[in-house]
Image (spheres, rainbow, N blue to C red):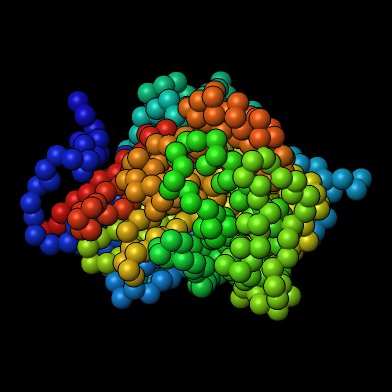
């Protein structure tokens, strides 16, 4: 029997939809249960902001290895009046953190920033969801929490995708009793396929927040439990860290690409800056004249990626702490970088470049992506994360809340790579209260002032390149969201000097790229993107979960 979300997905991909008056809402997430949570929010009178928060809280239950209230998020909102709101719920370094906290004998010790107490940043997702609902939602946060708590109490069957991720981190989870008691069986092994995972502790935490507001988390019992656990396990976070956390409203990054406005997220996201930069570099080239999977096309886009990621390594960090030049996303700077590209071969990129007025024109001081939209004019795109699979591996005992390991996104030492192989410089060094650099790239594309497409992704630094490729497929090649996400992906992040390509690109193209001087590494899949767009009539919502995953896109007409 088809899952309800799957039936709705089939309907929205071509079969007639039921006719109903009133607002239409659309949602796409990485899991059918979360997509249904968004749809239920629309049914209860919510707008796209409500649907996004409902999906986020449900994902914290059914997709908790990727995201949850123990992590962070970036949320980009387009309001019916055409204005934008960017809500930064990125984690922060504890107030007792210092730039050398992961150095031992003068060298970075990677495991300290990836597993256990020292890896955890102060969570920001809940504060962001709370802010979004208070300022822009129609339904109380408590109601959304109650709906998600019911899912946690009733449980859900573990599928192969969940068990694949769980199987990768069994040894990590065994180190922490609070985690092992939930995600592993009595023998300390992963649950079997089909096991119904119930999370009563997480349900109680959700219901406690519903009764007492986010203060329960940031100033109440959760903060106390966290402080006590940190003190006993060599961590730094205390009640003051949690009480002082604030989600921030920021000004989005905007650029124009072939007549389309691209609206992205500003620092501490590197995504908005470098999605804009890569597209600006590529604008002088006639991509539409090339086959979308040709070696010529892949080479040009790869060279733009390399130039942008070299700049990322040097310039990007939390703009509240580091001088991040606005010129990185300027057209003038992009034209200068475009001249460095040789269409026939891979050119050397030895270091970052420097935009004009780099010292004065500055920005103001494993992951999941989901998007929602409605016919009132609300469009929301949100990326949330606990970083790597099950984050730090820690669940604060008795809470059911998986804690992030976002401290690994700082530069533990200049030139030392993080778990994704990314390197950073002084701009992304650790400092108390600072937010680590992120690749999360929630993006909205407009034509003639109206949103036509929203996209974001999961997958570490490949998030940026996934978003770029999706936008190119839609804008340059006129593809639908489903077609755009189905194309073979590729990724280059400057260091290490290797071009990752999905095997579906084909051996002939790979051989041609090798001949152009690229070092190519073939992978089965790259990342997971989600998108919502408008059909050719400019009215009906069209969308796509990543065809590489198990997500769902649905449209519902409300009475």
Where in the figure is residue 79, as x and y percent of width and height?
33, 70
Q: Is residue 234 left or right of residue 177?
A: right
The image quarter in which residue 43 lies: bottom left
Q: Residue at x 61, y 62 (%)?
A: 334
Q: Is residue 151 above or below residue 196?
A: below
Q: Is residue 356 left or right of residue 194?
A: right
Q: Is residue 254 left or right of residue 482?
A: right
User: Which of these two is toward me, 142 or 466?
Assistant: 466
Q: Residue at x 38, y 74 (%)?
A: 83
Q: Quadrant of the C terminus?
A: bottom left
- Let me know if residue 473 appears in the view: yes
Where in the figure is residue 130, as x and y percent of width and height?
42, 65
Q: Residue at x 78, y 50 (%)?
A: 350
Residue at the extreme right:
105
Tag count: 0
Q: Is residue 487 left or right of residue 331?
A: left
The image quarter in which residue 241 lies: bottom right
User: Which of these two is toward me, 229 or 280?
Assistant: 280
Q: Is residue 57 above or below residue 241?
A: above
- Let me know if residue 390 appears in the view: no
User: Which of these two is toward me, 448 or 142?
Assistant: 448
Where in the figure is residue 339, as x and y percent of width and height?
65, 57
Q: Residue at x 68, y 54 (%)?
A: 340
Where in the figure is residue 549, as x and y percent of width and height?
41, 34
User: Which of these two is toward me, 202 or 510?
Assistant: 510
Q: Quadrant of the N terminus?
A: top left
């Amino acid at each position: 029997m088809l899952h309800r979300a799957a039936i709705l997905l089939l309907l929205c991909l071509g079969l007639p939809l039921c006719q109903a008056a009133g607002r239409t809402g659309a949602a796409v997430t990485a899991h059918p249960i979360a997509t249904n949570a968004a749809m239920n929010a629309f049914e209860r009178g919510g707008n796209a902001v409500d649907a996004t928060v409902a999906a986020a809280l449900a994902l914290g239950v059914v997709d908790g290895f990727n995201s949850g209230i123990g992590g962070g998020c970036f949320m980009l909102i387009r309001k019916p009046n055409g204005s934008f709101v960017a809500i930064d719920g990125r984690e922060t370094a504890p107030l007792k953190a210092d730039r050398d906290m992961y150095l031992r004998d003068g060298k970075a010790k990677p495991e300290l920033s990836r597993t256990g107490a020292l890896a955890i940043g102060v969570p920001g997702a809940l504060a962001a969801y709370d802010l979004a609902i208070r300022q822009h939602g129609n339904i109380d946060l408590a109601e959304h929490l109650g709906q998600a708590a019911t899912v946690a109490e009733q449980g859900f069957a573990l599928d192969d995708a969940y068990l694949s991720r769980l199987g990768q981190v069994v040894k990590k989870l065994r180190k922490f009793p609070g985690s092992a008691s939930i995600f592993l069986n009595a023998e300390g092994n992963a649950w079997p396929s089909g096991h119904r995972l119930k999370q009563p502790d997480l349900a109680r935490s959700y219901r406690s927040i519903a009764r007492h507001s986010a203060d329960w988390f940031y100033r109440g019992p959760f903060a106390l439990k966290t402080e006590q656990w940190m003190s006993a396990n060599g961590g730094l976070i205390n009640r003051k860290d949690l009480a002082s956390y604030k989600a921030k409203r920021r000004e989005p990054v905007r650029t124009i690409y072939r007549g389309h406005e691209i609206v992205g997220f500003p620092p501490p996201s590197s995504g908005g800056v470098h999605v804009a930069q890569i597209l600006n570099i590529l604008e002088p080239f006639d991509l539409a004249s090339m086959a979308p999977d040709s070696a010529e096309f892949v080479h040009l886009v790869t060279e733009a990626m390399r130039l942008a990621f070299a700049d990322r390594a040097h310039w990007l960090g939390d703009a509240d702490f580091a001088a991040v030049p606005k010129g990185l996303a300027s057209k003038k700077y992009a034209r200068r970088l475009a001249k460095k590209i040789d269409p026939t071969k891979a050119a050397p990129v030895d270091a970052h470049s420097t935009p004009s007025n780099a010292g004065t024109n500055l920005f103001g001081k494993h992951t999941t992506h989901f998007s929602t939209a409605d016919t009132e004019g609300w469009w929301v795109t949100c990326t949330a994360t606990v970083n790597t699979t099950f984050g730090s591996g820690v669940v604060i005992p008795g809470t059911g809340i998986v804690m992030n390991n976002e401290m690994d996104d700082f530069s533990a030492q200049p030139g030392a790579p993080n778990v994704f192989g990314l390197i950073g410089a002084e701009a992304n060094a650790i400092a108390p209260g600072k937010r680590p650099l992120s690749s999360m790239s929630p993006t909205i594309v407009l034509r003639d002032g109206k949103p036509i497409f929203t996209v974001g992704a999961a997958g570490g630094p490949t998030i940026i390149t996934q978003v770029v490729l999706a936008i190119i497929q839609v804008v340059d090649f006129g593809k639908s969201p489903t077609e755009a996400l189905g194309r073979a992906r590729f990724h280059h992040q400057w260091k290490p000097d290797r071009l990752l390509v999905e095997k579906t690109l084909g051996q002939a193209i790979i051989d041609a790229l090798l001949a152009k001087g690229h070092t190519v590494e073939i992978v089965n899949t790259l990342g997971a993107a989600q998108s919502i767009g408008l059909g050719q009539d400019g009215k009906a919502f069209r969308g796509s979960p990543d065809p590489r995953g198990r997500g769902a896109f649905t449209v519902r007409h409300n009475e």
